[in-house]
Amino acid sequence: MSMLWLGVVLLIALAAVFLFIPFILRLSRGELIREQNNVDIYKSQLEELAAEKEAGNVSEGDYDALVVEVKRNLLSDTRVPAKALENEKAGRWMAPFLFILTAISSVLLYSHLGFENEVAIADLLKQSNSVEFTKEDSQELLTRLKDKTKKEPKDIESWYLQGRIHFEMANYAESVKGFNGVLANLPNDAKEDQAVAMAQLAQAKFFAADRKLDAATQSLLQATLEINPQETTALGLLGVAAFDSKDFMNAIKYWQRLLALIPATNPNARAIQGGIDKAMSQLKPEQVAAFKAKQLAKPVASIMVTVDLSKEIIAQVPENADLFILAKAASGPPMPLAVKRLNNNTWPVTVVLDDSMAMMPALKMSNFDKVIITARISKSGVGNAKPGDIQGNSGVLAISAKKANVLIDEIIK
Protein backbone atom coordinates (compact mmCIF):
# COMPACT_ATOMS: atom_id res chain seq x y z
CA MET A 1 0.00 0.00 0.00
CA SER A 2 2.74 2.47 0.91
CA MET A 3 4.34 2.01 -2.51
CA LEU A 4 1.02 2.66 -4.23
CA TRP A 5 0.39 5.93 -2.42
CA LEU A 6 4.03 6.97 -2.79
CA GLY A 7 3.52 6.63 -6.54
CA VAL A 8 0.31 8.69 -6.32
CA VAL A 9 2.12 11.46 -4.38
CA LEU A 10 4.95 11.54 -6.93
CA LEU A 11 2.49 11.85 -9.81
CA ILE A 12 0.63 14.68 -8.07
CA ALA A 13 3.95 16.45 -7.43
CA LEU A 14 4.77 16.11 -11.12
CA ALA A 15 1.38 17.60 -11.97
CA ALA A 16 2.14 20.53 -9.65
CA VAL A 17 5.35 21.24 -11.56
CA PHE A 18 3.44 21.43 -14.83
CA LEU A 19 0.81 23.68 -13.24
CA PHE A 20 3.25 26.24 -11.73
CA ILE A 21 5.84 26.44 -14.53
CA PRO A 22 3.59 28.40 -16.96
CA PHE A 23 2.92 31.09 -14.35
CA ILE A 24 6.60 31.47 -13.52
CA LEU A 25 7.62 31.55 -17.17
CA ARG A 26 4.86 34.03 -17.94
CA LEU A 27 6.23 36.61 -15.44
CA SER A 28 9.83 36.20 -16.53
CA ARG A 29 8.96 36.33 -20.21
CA GLY A 30 6.78 39.43 -19.72
CA GLU A 31 9.59 41.38 -18.04
CA LEU A 32 12.07 40.43 -20.75
CA ILE A 33 9.71 41.47 -23.56
CA ARG A 34 9.00 44.87 -21.90
CA GLU A 35 12.68 45.65 -21.46
CA GLN A 36 13.50 44.65 -25.03
CA ASN A 37 10.70 46.86 -26.39
CA ASN A 38 11.96 49.88 -24.40
CA VAL A 39 15.50 49.40 -25.69
CA ASP A 40 14.26 49.08 -29.29
CA ILE A 41 12.23 52.32 -28.94
CA TYR A 42 15.24 54.11 -27.39
CA LYS A 43 17.51 53.11 -30.28
CA SER A 44 14.89 54.12 -32.85
CA GLN A 45 14.46 57.58 -31.30
CA LEU A 46 18.20 58.16 -31.18
CA GLU A 47 18.51 57.19 -34.87
CA GLU A 48 15.70 59.61 -35.79
CA LEU A 49 17.37 62.48 -33.87
CA ALA A 50 20.70 61.74 -35.54
CA ALA A 51 19.00 61.82 -38.96
CA GLU A 52 17.27 65.15 -38.15
CA LYS A 53 20.57 66.67 -36.96
CA GLU A 54 22.31 65.43 -40.13
CA ALA A 55 19.62 67.03 -42.27
CA GLY A 56 20.05 70.33 -40.46
CA ASN A 57 16.57 70.31 -39.01
CA VAL A 58 17.84 70.16 -35.37
CA SER A 59 20.58 72.35 -33.96
CA GLU A 60 23.45 70.94 -31.90
CA GLY A 61 22.05 72.33 -28.65
CA ASP A 62 18.55 71.01 -29.30
CA TYR A 63 19.97 67.63 -30.29
CA ASP A 64 21.84 67.24 -26.97
CA ALA A 65 18.75 68.28 -25.01
CA LEU A 66 16.55 65.81 -26.91
CA VAL A 67 19.03 62.91 -26.35
CA VAL A 68 18.93 63.61 -22.59
CA GLU A 69 15.11 63.56 -22.72
CA VAL A 70 15.07 60.16 -24.56
CA LYS A 71 17.40 58.65 -21.96
CA ARG A 72 15.15 59.93 -19.15
CA ASN A 73 12.15 58.34 -20.84
CA LEU A 74 14.02 55.01 -21.12
CA LEU A 75 14.86 55.02 -17.40
CA SER A 76 11.28 55.89 -16.55
CA ASP A 77 9.84 53.11 -18.74
CA THR A 78 12.13 50.38 -17.37
CA ARG A 79 10.71 50.95 -13.88
CA VAL A 80 7.62 48.64 -13.76
CA PRO A 81 4.64 50.44 -12.25
CA ALA A 82 2.86 48.70 -9.39
CA LYS A 83 -0.28 48.41 -11.50
CA ALA A 84 1.66 46.72 -14.29
CA LEU A 85 3.06 44.23 -11.81
CA GLU A 86 -0.41 43.53 -10.54
CA ASN A 87 -1.59 42.90 -14.07
CA GLU A 88 1.26 40.49 -14.67
CA LYS A 89 0.49 38.65 -11.41
CA ALA A 90 -3.19 38.42 -12.22
CA GLY A 91 -4.19 34.74 -12.25
CA ARG A 92 -1.28 33.52 -10.12
CA TRP A 93 -3.77 32.64 -7.35
CA MET A 94 -5.23 30.00 -9.65
CA ALA A 95 -2.07 27.84 -9.54
CA PRO A 96 -2.44 26.59 -5.93
CA PHE A 97 -6.21 26.30 -6.42
CA LEU A 98 -5.77 24.15 -9.52
CA PHE A 99 -3.13 22.06 -7.74
CA ILE A 100 -5.40 21.31 -4.78
CA LEU A 101 -8.33 20.59 -7.12
CA THR A 102 -6.17 18.22 -9.21
CA ALA A 103 -4.85 16.35 -6.16
CA ILE A 104 -8.26 15.86 -4.53
CA SER A 105 -10.07 14.93 -7.74
CA SER A 106 -7.31 12.47 -8.70
CA VAL A 107 -7.49 10.64 -5.37
CA LEU A 108 -11.29 10.55 -5.35
CA LEU A 109 -11.53 9.47 -8.98
CA TYR A 110 -8.96 6.70 -8.50
CA SER A 111 -10.70 5.49 -5.34
CA HIS A 112 -13.97 5.28 -7.28
CA LEU A 113 -12.81 3.96 -10.65
CA GLY A 114 -9.35 2.58 -9.99
CA PHE A 115 -8.06 -0.70 -8.54
CA GLU A 116 -6.78 0.57 -5.20
CA ASN A 117 -8.87 -1.96 -3.29
CA GLU A 118 -7.70 -4.87 -5.46
CA VAL A 119 -4.05 -3.83 -5.06
CA ALA A 120 -4.50 -3.59 -1.29
CA ILE A 121 -6.14 -7.04 -1.15
CA ALA A 122 -3.30 -8.56 -3.19
CA ASP A 123 -0.69 -6.98 -0.89
CA LEU A 124 -2.45 -8.17 2.25
CA LEU A 125 -2.78 -11.71 0.87
CA LYS A 126 0.95 -11.78 0.17
CA GLN A 127 1.64 -10.70 3.75
CA SER A 128 -0.82 -13.17 5.27
CA ASN A 129 1.70 -16.02 5.37
CA SER A 130 4.32 -13.98 7.25
CA VAL A 131 4.72 -13.67 11.01
CA GLU A 132 4.24 -9.89 10.71
CA PHE A 133 0.62 -10.38 9.61
CA THR A 134 -1.47 -9.13 12.54
CA LYS A 135 -5.08 -9.44 13.61
CA GLU A 136 -5.57 -5.83 12.48
CA ASP A 137 -4.26 -6.80 9.03
CA SER A 138 -6.77 -9.66 8.90
CA GLN A 139 -9.56 -7.27 9.83
CA GLU A 140 -8.49 -4.80 7.13
CA LEU A 141 -8.40 -7.61 4.58
CA LEU A 142 -11.90 -8.71 5.56
CA THR A 143 -13.21 -5.14 5.30
CA ARG A 144 -11.76 -4.75 1.82
CA LEU A 145 -13.10 -8.15 0.69
CA LYS A 146 -16.53 -7.18 1.98
CA ASP A 147 -16.38 -3.90 0.03
CA LYS A 148 -15.42 -5.84 -3.08
CA THR A 149 -18.34 -8.26 -2.80
CA LYS A 150 -20.70 -5.30 -2.34
CA LYS A 151 -19.51 -3.88 -5.65
CA GLU A 152 -19.11 -7.29 -7.32
CA PRO A 153 -21.61 -9.71 -5.69
CA LYS A 154 -20.59 -12.56 -8.01
CA ASP A 155 -16.90 -12.46 -7.03
CA ILE A 156 -16.65 -16.07 -5.82
CA GLU A 157 -13.02 -15.86 -4.74
CA SER A 158 -13.69 -12.90 -2.42
CA TRP A 159 -16.64 -14.73 -0.83
CA TYR A 160 -14.47 -17.82 -0.31
CA LEU A 161 -11.64 -15.81 1.25
CA GLN A 162 -14.09 -14.16 3.64
CA GLY A 163 -15.34 -17.58 4.70
CA ARG A 164 -11.83 -18.96 5.26
CA ILE A 165 -10.48 -15.92 7.14
CA HIS A 166 -13.53 -15.70 9.40
CA PHE A 167 -13.20 -19.43 10.12
CA GLU A 168 -9.54 -19.06 11.07
CA MET A 169 -10.51 -16.18 13.37
CA ALA A 170 -13.24 -18.38 14.93
CA ASN A 171 -15.99 -16.06 13.59
CA TYR A 172 -18.03 -19.07 12.51
CA ALA A 173 -21.34 -17.28 11.88
CA GLU A 174 -19.59 -14.85 9.50
CA SER A 175 -17.74 -17.77 7.93
CA VAL A 176 -21.10 -19.36 7.13
CA LYS A 177 -22.12 -16.15 5.29
CA GLY A 178 -18.94 -16.26 3.22
CA PHE A 179 -19.42 -19.85 2.05
CA ASN A 180 -23.11 -19.24 1.42
CA GLY A 181 -22.00 -16.42 -0.87
CA VAL A 182 -19.78 -18.87 -2.76
CA LEU A 183 -22.58 -21.39 -3.27
CA ALA A 184 -25.07 -18.71 -4.29
CA ASN A 185 -22.84 -17.61 -7.16
CA LEU A 186 -21.23 -20.83 -8.40
CA PRO A 187 -22.48 -22.04 -11.79
CA ASN A 188 -24.62 -25.19 -11.71
CA ASP A 189 -22.08 -27.24 -13.64
CA ALA A 190 -19.16 -26.48 -11.28
CA LYS A 191 -19.77 -29.64 -9.26
CA GLU A 192 -16.28 -30.07 -7.83
CA ASP A 193 -16.17 -26.46 -6.64
CA GLN A 194 -19.63 -26.91 -5.17
CA ALA A 195 -18.45 -29.92 -3.19
CA VAL A 196 -15.53 -27.95 -1.75
CA ALA A 197 -17.75 -25.01 -0.78
CA MET A 198 -20.42 -27.31 0.69
CA ALA A 199 -17.84 -29.07 2.85
CA GLN A 200 -16.42 -25.75 4.07
CA LEU A 201 -19.92 -24.44 4.79
CA ALA A 202 -20.80 -27.58 6.75
CA GLN A 203 -17.58 -27.25 8.75
CA ALA A 204 -18.37 -23.63 9.63
CA LYS A 205 -21.92 -24.60 10.65
CA PHE A 206 -20.58 -27.47 12.74
CA PHE A 207 -18.30 -25.19 14.76
CA ALA A 208 -20.89 -22.41 14.92
CA ALA A 209 -23.22 -24.95 16.59
CA ASP A 210 -20.54 -25.75 19.22
CA ARG A 211 -19.34 -28.92 17.47
CA LYS A 212 -22.81 -30.36 17.09
CA LEU A 213 -23.93 -31.85 13.79
CA ASP A 214 -27.59 -31.07 13.20
CA ALA A 215 -29.68 -32.88 10.60
CA ALA A 216 -29.34 -30.08 8.00
CA THR A 217 -25.55 -30.01 8.25
CA GLN A 218 -25.29 -33.79 8.12
CA SER A 219 -27.50 -33.80 5.03
CA LEU A 220 -25.21 -31.17 3.48
CA LEU A 221 -22.17 -33.38 4.14
CA GLN A 222 -23.84 -36.43 2.66
CA ALA A 223 -24.75 -34.40 -0.42
CA THR A 224 -21.10 -33.35 -0.64
CA LEU A 225 -19.96 -36.98 -0.69
CA GLU A 226 -22.50 -37.78 -3.38
CA ILE A 227 -20.79 -35.20 -5.61
CA ASN A 228 -17.27 -36.19 -4.56
CA PRO A 229 -16.86 -39.36 -2.45
CA GLN A 230 -13.22 -38.37 -1.84
CA GLU A 231 -13.95 -34.92 -0.35
CA THR A 232 -11.50 -34.98 2.57
CA THR A 233 -13.06 -32.19 4.66
CA ALA A 234 -16.45 -33.92 4.59
CA LEU A 235 -14.98 -37.32 5.51
CA GLY A 236 -12.93 -35.85 8.35
CA LEU A 237 -15.85 -33.84 9.69
CA LEU A 238 -18.26 -36.78 9.61
CA GLY A 239 -15.64 -38.81 11.47
CA VAL A 240 -15.26 -36.12 14.14
CA ALA A 241 -19.02 -35.77 14.52
CA ALA A 242 -19.45 -39.55 14.81
CA PHE A 243 -16.69 -39.76 17.41
CA ASP A 244 -18.17 -36.89 19.45
CA SER A 245 -21.54 -38.63 19.45
CA LYS A 246 -19.78 -41.89 20.52
CA ASP A 247 -20.60 -43.57 17.21
CA PHE A 248 -17.08 -45.02 17.12
CA MET A 249 -17.76 -47.57 14.39
CA ASN A 250 -18.78 -44.94 11.86
CA ALA A 251 -15.94 -42.65 13.00
CA ILE A 252 -13.49 -45.44 12.11
CA LYS A 253 -15.13 -45.97 8.71
CA TYR A 254 -15.01 -42.32 7.74
CA TRP A 255 -11.42 -41.86 8.96
CA GLN A 256 -10.23 -44.98 7.18
CA ARG A 257 -11.65 -43.62 3.93
CA LEU A 258 -9.94 -40.30 4.65
CA LEU A 259 -6.61 -41.98 5.47
CA ALA A 260 -6.70 -43.78 2.14
CA LEU A 261 -6.87 -40.44 0.31
CA ILE A 262 -3.80 -38.71 1.72
CA PRO A 263 -0.10 -39.59 1.32
CA ALA A 264 1.55 -41.44 4.19
CA THR A 265 4.03 -38.56 4.45
CA ASN A 266 1.23 -36.07 5.15
CA PRO A 267 1.54 -34.85 8.79
CA ASN A 268 -2.21 -35.35 9.23
CA ALA A 269 -1.95 -39.08 8.42
CA ARG A 270 -0.52 -39.87 11.87
CA ALA A 271 -3.23 -37.84 13.61
CA ILE A 272 -5.97 -39.60 11.63
CA GLN A 273 -4.50 -43.00 12.43
CA GLY A 274 -4.35 -41.95 16.07
CA GLY A 275 -8.05 -41.08 15.92
CA ILE A 276 -8.84 -44.47 14.39
CA ASP A 277 -6.87 -46.25 17.12
CA LYS A 278 -8.61 -44.22 19.82
CA ALA A 279 -12.03 -44.97 18.36
CA MET A 280 -11.11 -48.65 18.08
CA SER A 281 -10.15 -48.67 21.78
CA GLN A 282 -13.65 -47.48 22.67
CA LEU A 283 -15.33 -50.46 20.98
CA LYS A 284 -16.43 -53.50 22.91
CA PRO A 285 -14.50 -56.74 22.20
CA GLU A 286 -17.41 -58.19 20.27
CA GLN A 287 -17.63 -55.01 18.16
CA VAL A 288 -13.92 -55.21 17.36
CA ALA A 289 -14.29 -58.84 16.35
CA ALA A 290 -17.30 -58.06 14.16
CA PHE A 291 -15.47 -55.12 12.56
CA LYS A 292 -12.38 -57.19 11.73
CA ALA A 293 -14.52 -60.02 10.39
CA LYS A 294 -16.33 -57.57 8.13
CA GLN A 295 -13.01 -56.19 6.91
CA LEU A 296 -11.78 -59.68 6.10
CA ALA A 297 -15.04 -60.51 4.36
CA LYS A 298 -14.55 -57.68 1.88
CA PRO A 299 -13.95 -58.93 -1.66
CA VAL A 300 -10.29 -58.78 -2.67
CA ALA A 301 -9.74 -56.70 -5.79
CA SER A 302 -7.70 -58.45 -8.47
CA ILE A 303 -6.95 -57.45 -12.08
CA MET A 304 -4.96 -59.49 -14.61
CA VAL A 305 -2.81 -57.06 -16.65
CA THR A 306 -1.23 -57.86 -20.02
CA VAL A 307 1.55 -55.47 -21.11
CA ASP A 308 2.98 -55.20 -24.63
CA LEU A 309 5.22 -52.86 -26.63
CA SER A 310 4.18 -50.81 -29.64
CA LYS A 311 6.11 -51.60 -32.83
CA GLU A 312 7.49 -48.04 -32.97
CA ILE A 313 9.04 -48.30 -29.51
CA ILE A 314 10.62 -51.79 -29.55
CA ALA A 315 14.02 -50.59 -30.80
CA GLN A 316 14.35 -48.15 -27.88
CA VAL A 317 13.71 -50.72 -25.14
CA PRO A 318 16.84 -52.14 -23.49
CA GLU A 319 17.20 -55.88 -22.86
CA ASN A 320 16.21 -57.06 -19.40
CA ALA A 321 14.33 -53.81 -18.90
CA ASP A 322 13.14 -52.82 -15.43
CA LEU A 323 9.37 -52.92 -15.81
CA PHE A 324 7.03 -51.43 -13.19
CA ILE A 325 3.31 -52.24 -13.40
CA LEU A 326 1.19 -50.28 -10.95
CA ALA A 327 -2.38 -49.37 -10.14
CA LYS A 328 -3.42 -45.93 -8.91
CA ALA A 329 -6.78 -44.54 -7.90
CA ALA A 330 -8.41 -42.65 -10.77
CA SER A 331 -9.39 -39.95 -8.27
CA GLY A 332 -7.49 -40.00 -5.03
CA PRO A 333 -3.99 -40.19 -3.57
CA PRO A 334 -0.92 -40.23 -5.83
CA MET A 335 0.54 -43.28 -4.08
CA PRO A 336 0.19 -46.63 -5.92
CA LEU A 337 -2.43 -49.07 -4.65
CA ALA A 338 -0.52 -52.06 -6.02
CA VAL A 339 2.93 -52.43 -7.60
CA LYS A 340 4.68 -55.26 -9.43
CA ARG A 341 8.32 -55.03 -10.58
CA LEU A 342 9.82 -57.30 -13.26
CA ASN A 343 13.14 -57.61 -15.04
CA ASN A 344 11.72 -58.48 -18.40
CA ASN A 345 12.95 -59.39 -21.91
CA THR A 346 9.94 -61.19 -23.35
CA TRP A 347 6.78 -59.49 -24.64
CA PRO A 348 3.89 -59.46 -24.02
CA VAL A 349 3.98 -60.09 -20.27
CA THR A 350 1.05 -60.80 -17.95
CA VAL A 351 0.83 -60.16 -14.19
CA VAL A 352 -1.90 -60.00 -11.55
CA LEU A 353 -2.36 -56.90 -9.37
CA ASP A 354 -4.39 -57.35 -6.18
CA ASP A 355 -4.91 -56.08 -2.63
CA SER A 356 -1.97 -58.09 -1.28
CA MET A 357 0.38 -55.68 -3.08
CA ALA A 358 -0.92 -52.60 -1.22
CA MET A 359 1.75 -50.37 0.30
CA MET A 360 -0.59 -49.44 3.19
CA PRO A 361 -3.67 -51.26 4.57
CA ALA A 362 -5.89 -48.27 3.85
CA LEU A 363 -4.46 -47.87 0.34
CA LYS A 364 -5.63 -50.97 -1.46
CA MET A 365 -7.49 -51.40 -4.70
CA SER A 366 -10.75 -52.63 -3.16
CA ASN A 367 -11.16 -49.30 -1.35
CA PHE A 368 -11.64 -47.45 -4.65
CA ASP A 369 -14.24 -47.65 -7.39
CA LYS A 370 -11.98 -46.80 -10.33
CA VAL A 371 -8.28 -47.29 -11.06
CA ILE A 372 -5.71 -46.63 -13.79
CA ILE A 373 -3.08 -49.26 -14.62
CA THR A 374 0.30 -47.90 -15.76
CA ALA A 375 3.21 -49.90 -17.15
CA ARG A 376 6.57 -48.12 -17.19
CA ILE A 377 10.01 -49.17 -18.43
CA SER A 378 12.47 -47.41 -16.15
CA LYS A 379 15.92 -46.70 -17.50
CA SER A 380 17.07 -45.52 -14.08
CA GLY A 381 15.79 -48.61 -12.25
CA VAL A 382 13.46 -46.62 -9.94
CA GLY A 383 9.68 -46.60 -9.90
CA ASN A 384 9.19 -42.81 -10.13
CA ALA A 385 8.68 -41.51 -13.65
CA LYS A 386 11.72 -39.76 -15.13
CA PRO A 387 12.49 -38.21 -18.52
CA GLY A 388 13.50 -40.92 -20.97
CA ASP A 389 11.35 -43.63 -19.37
CA ILE A 390 8.82 -45.36 -21.62
CA GLN A 391 5.24 -45.97 -20.51
CA GLY A 392 1.61 -46.59 -21.34
CA ASN A 393 -1.65 -46.80 -19.38
CA SER A 394 -5.00 -48.50 -19.48
CA GLY A 395 -7.20 -45.46 -19.03
CA VAL A 396 -9.82 -45.46 -16.27
CA LEU A 397 -11.08 -48.94 -15.27
CA ALA A 398 -13.82 -50.02 -12.90
CA ILE A 399 -12.37 -51.95 -9.98
CA SER A 400 -14.69 -54.81 -10.96
CA ALA A 401 -12.76 -55.28 -14.20
CA LYS A 402 -10.93 -58.59 -14.16
CA LYS A 403 -8.59 -57.93 -17.08
CA ALA A 404 -6.69 -54.98 -18.53
CA ASN A 405 -4.40 -54.43 -21.53
CA VAL A 406 -1.62 -51.83 -21.52
CA LEU A 407 0.40 -50.81 -24.58
CA ILE A 408 3.73 -49.08 -23.85
CA ASP A 409 4.03 -46.41 -26.53
CA GLU A 410 5.07 -43.10 -24.97
CA ILE A 411 8.50 -41.67 -24.12
CA ILE A 412 8.39 -39.36 -21.10
CA LYS A 413 9.82 -35.94 -21.92
Image (tube, grey):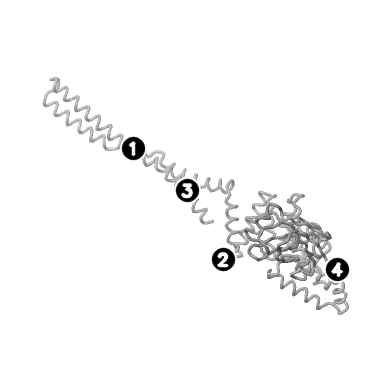
Mark 3 and mark 2: span between their CA atoms?
30 Å
Pick out the residue farthest to the left. 60
Dot 2: element: loop
Viewed as shown, does residue 292 lie left or right of 70? right
How far separated are the C-alphas under marks 4 and 2? Answer: 52 Å
Amino acid type, label 4: Lys
Q: Which circle, 1 or 4, is nearer the viewer?
A: 4
Label 1 element class = helix
Residue visible at 44% across and 41% down? 94
Q: Which residue is mark 4?
A: 298
The disc, 1 or 4, on the residue closer to the chain's N-terminal end is 1
Q: Which residue is mark 2?
A: 132
Disc 3 target residue: 11
In this view, 99 is above or below 217: above
**Which one is in front, 49 or 247?**
247
Q: Nearer the viewer, residue 28 or 173?
A: 173
- The numbered mark at residue 265 is none
Is the residue marked by circle 4 packed among few (<14), some (14-19), or many (20+) residues within 10 Å?
Answer: few
**Which one is earlier in the sequence, the residue at label 4 or at label 2?**
2
Q: Amino acid at mark 1?
A: Arg
